[in-house]
Amino acid sequence: MDFMRLLKSLEELLYEVMVMLVFFPRTLYLVLRHPQRMMDYADTELGDVQSEQYNDTLSPPLFLMICLAVNHLIEQALPAADRASLPAFLHDTQNLLMFRVFMFSLLPLVLALRLLARLGIALDRETLRPVFYSQCFVTAPIAMMVGLATGLWQIGGTTPAQIATVIFWGGIFWYLVQQTLWFRAKLKSGYGIAALNAVGASLVAVLLIIITAVTIGFVTAMQAR
C-alpha cells in the first residue's frame, strides 16, 4: 500500500514538473504581452477555490522562483560565472537561489505595502496576498533581465556590454511603466502621482535589498575571522 502511494506521489511530481515546461513559457509570454491584465488576473484568481487557482498559468510566486532558477542556469552556462567574490555560504547553489528569491521578493512586498498604505487598507495576511501576488508577476521578468544583464557584463567585451546595457535599462523602464500604470489604476490618480509612488516604492525596495546584502556580507565576513 505504501509502495503504491509512493508511486502515485512520483506520478504527480512528474506531471507537475513536465507541466511547468509548458506553462512557464506561456506565463512569461502573457506577462510580457499583457502585464496589467495578468496583474488583475493574479488578484481575481485568489477568489477561486484553491484547486482551481491558476489552472492555465503558474502561480505568481512559483513563476518568480522559476525565473530566478532559469537565471541561475543561464549564469552557470556563461564562461565568466564566478562565485569567488560571494560570501562563503552563497557558494552553495541552494543557498544562492534562496537568497536571490528572498532579495527579489522584497520588490513585490514593498510595492504591495505601498499600495495598501495609499489606499488606507488595514494590513493583514488576506489583504496583502492579492497585491503581493500581482506584483510577483511583473517582478519575475525584471529579475530575469537583471540576471541576464549581469551575466553579460561579467563576460566583458564591447558587444556583450552593450547588449547587457540595453537589457538592463530596457527592463527597468518596462518595470517602472507597469508600476506606474498599476498605481494609476488602483489609486485612480494621474500619471504624475502614480509615477512618484512607483519610483519611490521601487527605490525603497532596492535600498532594502542593498542594505540586506551588505549586512549579510558583513556578518559573514565577521564570522569567517
Image (cartoon, rainbow, N blue to C red):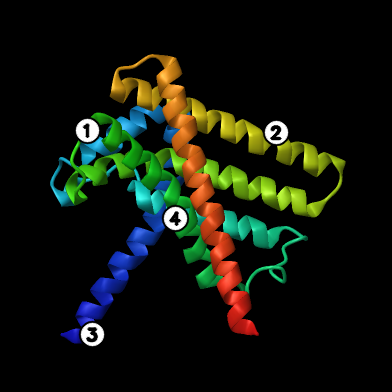
Labels 1, 2: front one: 1
**Circle 1 — which element?**
loop
Amino acid type at mark 1? Gly
Residue placed under numbered mark 1 in the picture: 120
Residue placed under numbered mark 2 in the picture: 166
Residue placed under numbered mark 3 in the picture: 3
Q: Can residue 67 be seen in this view?
A: no
Q: Are marks 3 and 4 in contact (CB under 8 Å)?
A: no
Q: Is residue 18 left or right of residue 216?
A: left
Residue placed under numbered mark 4 in the picture: 65
In percent of width and height, residue 143 lies at 53, 46
Q: Which of 44 and 220 is in front in this view?
A: 220
Amino acid type at mark 2? Val
> Which quarter of the figure has residue 214?
bottom right
Vertical arrangement, residue 21 with respect to residue 121, above or below: below
Measured Cα–Cα span from mark 1 to mark 2:
38 Å
Q: Are marks 1 and 4 in contact (CB under 8 Å)?
A: no
Query: In percent of the image, x 65 and y 38: which residue is there?
Result: 168
Amino acid type at mark 3? Phe
Vertical arrangement, residue 140 with respect to residue 19, above or below: above
Mark closest to the chain's N terminus, 3 or 4: 3
> Which quarter of the figure has residue 30?
top left
Mark 3 nearby-residue class (10 Å; few <14, some 14–19, many ≥20): few
Measured Cα–Cα span from mark 3 to mark 4:
31 Å
In percent of width and height, residue 213 lies at 56, 61
Labels 1, 4: front one: 1
